[in-house]
Image: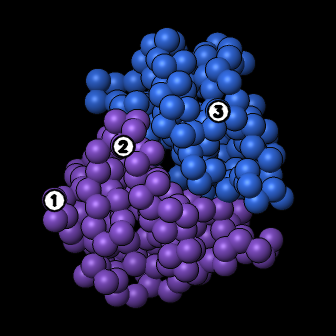
Chain colours: A blue, B purple
Amino acid sequence: MEQRISLVTLGVRDLPRARAFYEELGWRGQEVEETVFFQAGGVVVVLWGRDRLAADCGVPDPDSREAWFGGTALAHNVREREEVDAVLAEAATAGATVTRPAGETPYGGYAGVFTDPDGHAWEISWNPGFPIAEDGSVTVPPLT
Amino acid sequence: MEQRISLVTLGVRDLPRARAFYEELGWRGQEVEETVFFQAGGVVVVLWGRDRLAADCGVPDPDSREAWFGGTALAHNVREREEVDAVLAEAATAGATVTRPAGETPYGGYAGVFTDPDGHAWEISWNPGFPIAEDGSVTVPPLT
């Protein structure tokens, strides 16, 4: 697993309220399918429904203390589809819990999610629509 | 507030366990004062005690549903000390809760924390020890 981070997704309870908040701070993003993408330097900050994010990560929200969802998910995008399974296997070996096995994604990619020993969710994603630069940085493409 | 992110801090319950986990994934960091810093592309991923992180952010962990700590904090580093107060004020105007007013930090900087409407903690930090490049990326300096 390369030493980098690609997206930070903030699970939110009210998307218009959350988007308005960041816009009030001067941020400008793109909204598509009730998801807001902000290019933030070489990473992407995403706002998405907290319940959907928890479900998407395969993590209960928020009552079980054992597998507890903190409301944030990290994403690590890979360059080749095959790397998804490899990274998930590597993480499982390292002690992670694979909370969503790798599978096709609605956006034409392939991804899975693990939680680290503290329950932090990492999505390992091959997403051909989000180019990865040589230096590992991710750029949000035009989405609409 | 510039549209970027500087650090992602993961609150962890057992630092050696967490560090071993990421090292098992191939990551290499620097540990100083029970804090592990990983350079991750243009951002920095930090491991730190969950209780300290919650306290540092001024957020209870984790029983109050109203001001609830998700175990992750984002940092937005600024170039000039004066920007800290400006960004906190801007955030408060936008509806944030300032959970830790701006003040001197143990590392010789100046910082404060706000939580967004969903409780996500953002530290706004002027940290002269962590250089910010022209493009906004942050580089971990040699710490030991």
Between label 3 and label 1, give the one nearer the viewer. Answer: 3
Q: Measure the C-alpha gap from mark 1 to mark 2.
A: 18 Å
Name the residue type under label 1: Pro
**Residue A117 horizontal/vertical position (percent):** 57, 49
> Can residue A118 be seen from the camera position used here?
yes
Q: Which label number is shown at residue A98?
A: 3
B78 vs B21, nearest the viewer: B21
- Tell me how far mark 2 sits from mark 3, CA to CA: 18 Å
Residue at image coords 48%, 37%: A94
- Label 1 marks a residue whose chain is B
Residue sitting at 64 percent across and 33 percent down?
A: A98
Q: What secondary structure is marked by label 3?
A: strand
Quadrant for the N terminus of chain A, please: top left
Under circle 2, the secondary element is helix
Label 3 vs label 1: CA separation?
34 Å
Q: Residues within 10 Å of mark 1 (few under 14, many from 20)?
A: few
Circle 2/circle 3 CB separation < 8 Å: no
Tell me what residue is drawn at x 61 percent, y 22 percent: A111
Q: Is residue B120 above or below residue B99?
A: above
A93 versus B127 height, above or below: above
Q: Residue at x 40, y 88 (%)?
A: B103
Reading the image, the residue beneath label 1 is B142
**Residue picked out by circle 2:** B23
A122, B130: nearer the viewer:
A122
Output the chain of dot 2: B
Give residue B86's quadrant in the image: bottom left
Left or right, B57 with respect to A63, comes to left
Percent of width and height locating residue A80: 45, 13
The crowd level at tag 2 (other Cα within 10 Å; few <14, some 14-19, many 20+) is few
* Tags 3 and 1 on a common chain: no
Same-subunit check for callouts 2 and 3: no
Specify which label sits upstream in the sequence, 1 or 2. 2
